[in-house]
Image (tube, helix red, strand yellow):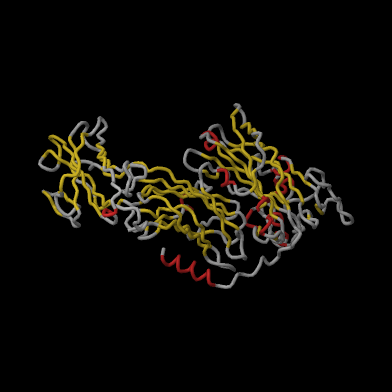
Amino acid sequence: MKSHLAVLAMLALLPSARAQSNAIAGIDTRLSRLSTITALGRSGAFPDGVSGVAMATTVCNDGTLTVAWRAAMDPSHPKIAFLVVREGEQRLEQISDRSYVKHGFFAANTIGCGVQCQQPTGGVLGEELGLGCSDTYATDNNGDQFWLAPPDEIDPWLGTWDPVCSHFDRGEPDVGAPANCNGLRSLTRTQVNALGPVGHRIHIRDEDLLLGGRTFFQGQYVVEGEPEAVREDNLGSREFTAQWNGTRWELDVTTSGVIEGSVLGRWSGAELASAVNGADDGRVYAAVKVTGPVEGFYHYEYALHDRDNARGVGALHVPLCSGARVRNLGFHDVDQDPSTDWVATVGANEVAFATDHAPLRWNTVFNFWFDCDAAPATGSLALDAFDPGPGSNALALDLSAPVVLANVHLGPGCASDVPPTLFAAGTPPRAELGNASFALVSTGNEPSQPNVLRLSLASGAVSIHGCTSWIGGPGVRGSFAVSDASGIATHPLPIPSDPALEGLDARFQAVGFAPGSGILFGAFELSDALLVRVGSSRPACP
């Protein structure tokens, strides 16, 4: 983690990066409506099938220049990207595939933007979107596979697309040389019709809709030359519900309108931040939601959304207190291929997720999660750019991370089967001065049995009949409790408002009575041990 922080520090000292190379002041479009989302076709039998979905989008020209809207194979037209997410109990994740992108081909120039629509003068009808004018593509139009092409053909940062050797040029199946790379359209209606009812439309699996939760669909306009400063309203989302009617999914939009910005903003209770690679590449959003603690562990959920970053993201680095425990690491992307999953590693000062072949690309949401016994506070996350290119090689975002470790795990317990656990509780679960609610709790004990909390101010480990005391010896008796019917023993340890206690390190380990099966003398078990850092002014990490 230190190496990433050093890189970020050096980047901060560099001169500001050059501006967006093709930015044109006066180009400013806005996604104004998402009116419907519809399942146009499906493959497979319910509940194991896949629906081919499309959504209706409306754009407004809020700028001072007309916007080119020429049909393929002329590259001067907008592109429209789509994705669908589901918010479950813990995370917000993409449930659509990385779907193909709609290539615009005709601007209707209708009213609907709240201002007068100034029809373009001169030129060919429909090849420009006029000032204050709107244009709508209905679901059948956005789901027309004749106008859908792979997202990787587009540079989302510059908004550019090269028709030569493109999907439209090659055809499907590929028509072969030289016709597949001459800049002329080879993809025909006959080829498109052979793709079937799902084809290159948005793919959503039955099993994802059956999970329930809240569902949202997002549209995004990509316009060549539009400055980054005015792109936040180029994308937006809307909520919908899904109901299986015995034949197809009925997708009904709720009454709420479009909420501009990344769909990660829909995640209830989550923090949201974003960053760019200097001024040379697009924006990536990151969100985090922290819950708990449960038995001393907080659950951290992160999500990344690449709006228009062309280089992509190849690693996520989350800062971590040294000595903190991390477990239950997980990852979710948009395919069903385990070979594309990112690899998670826990270092001395960070939790990292990384890939060498399957980066986060634009118009995609990835999820990362883990449990940790360090509490959340604002930390600096680093996102590594995947491809080489202009701009910084890492993006920095300030979000909650496991960077407060008030209770340090010293070592495991000892039992004939699974040792009892020991963790801090209270509001907060930290031994701050004046915290009358602070307590230590031992779980996994025999029900309704004596439980003694041992205390020591000495460091070190001592072997006691084959078990380890991690508190520098047997210690002294600090508290006595009787476990409840679930085997939980609670030891209240209110912390006085005494400045003399500031900076104290107290070591605790619980001894539980397990008659006939305890590993110590056939009657006792040891919990794991904690170092409790007492005080209100302690550094966040030991």
- The image quarter containing residue 417 is top left
* In the displayed structure image, the side of residue 15 where residue 344 appears, left or right: left
Can residue 343 be spotted in the picture?
A: yes
* In the displayed structure image, the side of residue 60 where residue 500 appears, left or right: left
The quarter in which the C terminus is drawn is bottom left
The quarter in which the N terminus is drawn is bottom left
Between 426 and 153, which is closer to the camera in this rendering? 426
Tell me the residue at 81%/52% (across/down): 131
Residue 111, how many percent across, how many down?
A: 82, 44
Between 482 and 492, which is closer to the camera in this rendering? 492
Query: Please, is residue 483 above or below residue 230 in the view?
Result: above
Residue 11, how many percent across, how many down?
A: 52, 69
Can residue 172 be spotted in the picture?
A: no
* In the displayed structure image, the side of residue 303 where residue 199 appears, left or right: right
Residue 17, how many percent across, how many down?
A: 61, 69
Query: Please, is residue 103 above or below residue 55 in the view?
Result: below
Between 313 and 539, which is closer to the camera in this rendering? 539
